[in-house]
Image (cartoon, rainbow, N blue to C red):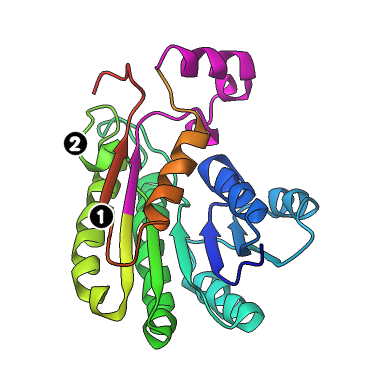
Amino acid sequence: MKQDKVILITGATSGVGKALAEHYYKKNYKLVLVGGSKEKVDKQSKKYRKNTLFLCADLTKPKDIKKVVADSIAKFKKIDILIANAGLYEPDKIISGNPERWDRVISVNVTSVFRLIHLVLPYMKKNKFGDIAITSSISGHQAIHWEPIYSASKHAIQSFAHGLRTQVSKYNIRVISIAPGMIMTELWDLDLVKDKKYINKMIKKGSALDVKEVVSCFDFALSRARGSNVRDLVILPTNQDL
């Protein structure tokens, strides 16, 4: 079935973003897929043969964010759905942590989302249509003591999403926040996430989410009738102790 909608996905070369890209590519959406690694972007682009624009961007740089939006509009003339998914994980203890890394986490998890949405909104307002879906986290709903910087970044995103929704709803723009618990993806930067047997074991016993379940949450929220806005959707592994 021909699909005319254009989706821009950040963090599209790994984890949830990669799974979202694969899902919506199969549904024949037009895609703008943004990744931070040229190697990963080049590798993934070989699997997509139609209606897809791949972009490599450093989302800590405002000029790169502007180029992402400009290139998207130049290619497809519009952006119907923005999935602001790119993020960095930060488990550091405050007393021994690295403030330079904290700045980068806030820049990607928070500031880049602000800037990207700011640039996309005028096009959605002009077309009187848009969906902004943000990958949040259970850490945005409760402070988790072993990741205070990451939790703070996701709390900021939750507050931003709630305020934004009320500002733009009159333009037929929805704002959606999807907040997963533990998913075994590259976000953790651990060798274990490369072990499929270990991942399947974690999923089977309800200690981690299958990334496909998170994709289904985005699909559910985005497919609601226009009169409905799934403001917050939290999904946890059955046995995650939070």
Q: Are marks 1 and 2 in contact (CB under 8 Å)?
A: no
The type of residue carrying mark 1 is Arg
What whole-number distance in Å separates the C-alpha atoms at marks 1 and 2?
17 Å
Q: Secondary structure at mark 1?
A: loop
The type of residue carrying mark 2 is Gln
Q: Position of residue 242 (x, y in %)?
A: 23, 24
From which residue to which does the magenta span run? 177-206
Name the residue rendered at 75%, 55% in the picture.
48
Q: Secondary structure at mark 2?
A: loop
Q: Nearer the viewer, residue 89 or 121?
A: 121
Which image quadrant is residue 206 in?
top left
Q: Which residue is mark 1?
A: 231
Q: Nearer the viewer, residue 189 or 178?
A: 178
Q: Earlier in the sequence, mark 1 or mark 2?
A: 2
Q: Position of residue 226 (x, y in %)?
A: 33, 67
Label for residue 142?
2
In the image, 90: left or right of 76?
left
Name the residue rendered at 54%, 64% in the picture.
7
Q: Is residue 194 magenta?
A: yes
In the image, 11: left or right of 175?
right
Give the position of the N terminus as an image quadrant.
bottom right
Which image quadrant is residue 163 in?
bottom left
Q: Nearer the viewer, residue 161 or 192?
A: 161
